[in-house]
Image (tube, grey):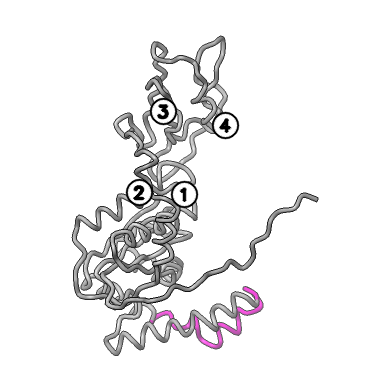
Amino acid sequence: MAIKTSRSSANGSILIHTELCTVCGKCVEVCKDFSLIIKDKKLQVNPDPVFGCIGCGHCMAVCPNDAIEISGRTLKLDDLFELPTQKDAATYQNLLALLNRRRSIREFTDQCIEPEMIEQILTAARCSPMGLPPSDVQVLVFDSKEKNRAFAEDFCKYLEGMRWLVSPWFLWLMRPLWGKATHEVFSGFVKPLFKVYTEKMKEGINAVTYDAPLAIYFYGTPFCDPADPIVAATNAMIAGESLGLGTCMLGAVHPLIQQGKNAKKFREKHGIRSKSREGLFVIFGHPSVTYQKGIKRTFAAEDIYQQQ
């Protein structure tokens, strides 16, 4: 039975060109669905795989003789390309320097982001790993300051109708139901956020998307692995940094437009195709400020597993 996504409800199709196959076994080694087996010294399609071909393309990409062709689940032979050599890839030091230089930028010049640069960012984001192919990440691009401002203004109007969510009576009512941690998040973060978003907008200040010249919203479908939009957004952010842009991830908008009839109407109005467990906005622009120092970061814990 095929694993369903919003883009496919059938397994991939495996074609073995036996005249090219040397039965090296590399494809069998990389197929974690066990869709391929070697039997009677011949490569064959396994009649009893785990799920059926999910269309990852690993077997097709590893084969040195082009003896395997996968089609379906949006995959086709034309999607293969020659990998860049290791010398063309970024070194660890180059990557670390890029990440160390990154700061969350919310102050931008009025310079627009050219369509070619937007496509470069999206091209990098499309390379993101995913839980299951084909990717169920959906992308909404706001390619101007004016579009970002219009979305933010409408979002603040939407929030005005949801003030009950952070009202004292609702927080008091929900505290025993959702627990101490969630209560503290709503009281200490969500409630002040409502206030700053709506009151600043009344002053003409966009504290939602900061009037960035480019914002990209990454979200999923009901079938999407929750991590996939976050990974794609991260790759987009790194791509933007590599192009000399300032970037910032914005996580507060997404969860507030997921639940309820008004949220559905808001999504439909702005071309957001579905609700999604996880999602992120990333804003981009030419920075109007320059940072001189970086700041070291740490994890909450870094434990090395000790076998008992």
The secondary element bearing badge 1 is classed as loop
User: Which of marks 2 and 3 precedes in the sequence?
Assistant: 3
Q: Residues within 10 Å of mark 3 (few under 14, many from 20)?
A: many
Real-space CA distance between mark 4 and mark 1, rounded to the nearest whole angstrom:
19 Å
- Judge by depth and name the residue closer to the eye, 94 or 74: 94
User: Dot 4 corresponds to which residue?
Assistant: 50
Whether label 2 touches label 1, CB < 8 Å: no
Up/down of 47 relative to 51, above or below: above
Real-space CA distance between mark 3 and mark 2, rounded to the nearest whole angstrom:
19 Å
Whether label 4 touches label 2, CB < 8 Å: no
The secondary element bearing badge 3 is classed as helix
Magenta range is 160-179
Question: Residue drawn 29% across and 64% down?
Answer: 244
Q: Amino acid at mark 2?
A: Arg
Q: Residues within 10 Å of mark 1 (few under 14, many from 20)?
A: some
User: Which of marks 1 and 4 precedes in the sequence?
Assistant: 4
- Residue 102 is left or right of residue 147, and the answer is right
Question: Residue drawn 36% across and 36% down?
Answer: 83
User: Dot 3 corresponds to which residue?
Assistant: 60
Q: Of tags 4 and 1, which is closer to the observer?
A: 4
User: Dot 2 corresponds to which residue?
Assistant: 126
Real-space CA distance between mark 4 and mark 2, rounded to the nearest whole angstrom:
27 Å
- Judge by depth and name the residue closer to the eye, 160 or 134: 134
- Residue 133 is left or right of residue 273, and the answer is right
